[in-house]
Amino acid sequence: TMSVVGGEALAQHIDTWASGGKEKTADLVREYAAAPAPAAGAHPLKALLLELVYAVLKGKLDAGKLCDTLANATMVPEEVRPRVQSDLADIFWLVGLQLEADEERSKKEKKPLVLLIKELLREKVLLPDLLKTRLEPEMLQETELITDHAQFNKQQVRMNTRTLYTQQKYNLFREESEGYSKLITELSELPAANGKETSTRGCKQASEVITNVQSLIGYFDLEPNRVLDLVLEAVEAVPSRVRHSKLLSLFNPKYIPHVLGFKLNSYFSAKEPTPPSLCTLCAVLLQHKVMALEQLLPHLTPSVAELAAAAETRRSAMLAQ
């Protein structure tokens, strides 16, 4: 049965650190790292590391000796290192909270804790990015991982707000339908790249149209993805317009395959043949590297897996003849 080293056993390992205690502790680290998580209570490895940290804080074990042991690739091999790093980060967070709640204890143990963390960072036993996700901002400032904990707090709140509360859906009620009629008119003026006349007002510079499109999007609060749909239709009507790369660069490139996929699926769902112009549009966008084939494949029917299965069936039928 496996039990966490503690009390007299751990004290004996620490007392005999230079004459075998270090190796015995490293053996336990490897053994406990491979142990399954218990149904209840702390994991044996975490409990062991916690006792070792306490020993350093109380002056019973030198911080440098513990760091050397944990940094030794033979004693703590690469496969158990991520588990050790994660458990140590949790332990330092816990001990930091304990010291915050006990002012008398904090006066004695805060400095050794900070020095231990710095030493482990220096020996690359701990990863800075991991600690930034676990430790309190005040402790991060003490260990010099950040310069200002108050500023770090503000940035964290801002990031959380942006991630959790910022709406990604566009409010379509803000749009004005007049904007779309003007947008369609403007897109029809987009000149062809092969010299053919496509503009009713004789527009020869794509930059003029692109500037006007940007102005219409902003002035009429047009939804960008719906504008992208109309831009793709303008390119579909005159494929050479794809060379005006600045127009398509107004939009997030990862949305282009999805808009095309919606168009393709609408024809498939209605059991209508896909227009050749839409196939040409996909081809020129691929040719000019506006998107990658891997981005478009999930939207095509039949799927790659279905094609492979059909090819295998056909091959088997031919071999059987």
Image (spheres, helix red, strand yellow):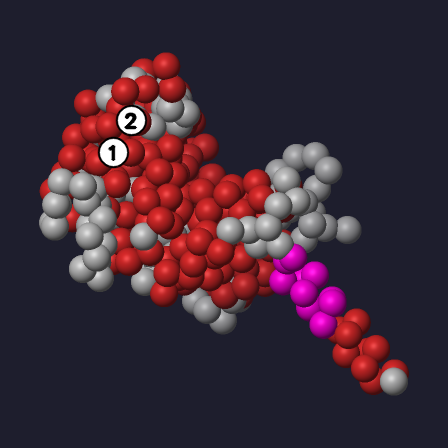
Q: Which residue is mark 2?
A: 181
Residue type at tag 2: Ser
Q: Residue at x 40, y 47 (%)?
A: 256
* Magenta-span inclusion, residue 244: no
* Magenta-span inclusion, residue 310: yes
Whether residue 117 is situated above or below residue 81 in the rendered picture:
above
Of 298 and 70, the residue lying toward us: 298
Where residue 155 sits in the image (x, y, percent)? 26, 30
Where residue 70 sits in the image (x, y, percent)? 44, 59
Residue type at tag 1: Thr
Figure disc tally = 2
At mark 2, the secondary structure is helix
Outermost residue on the right side: it is 320
Q: Which residue is mark 1?
A: 185
Where residue 53 sits in the image (x, y, percent)? 44, 44
Pointer 1 and pointer 2: residues touching (CB < 8 Å)?
Answer: yes
Q: Residue at x 81, y 82 (%)?
A: 318
For the record, the magenta segment spans: 302-311
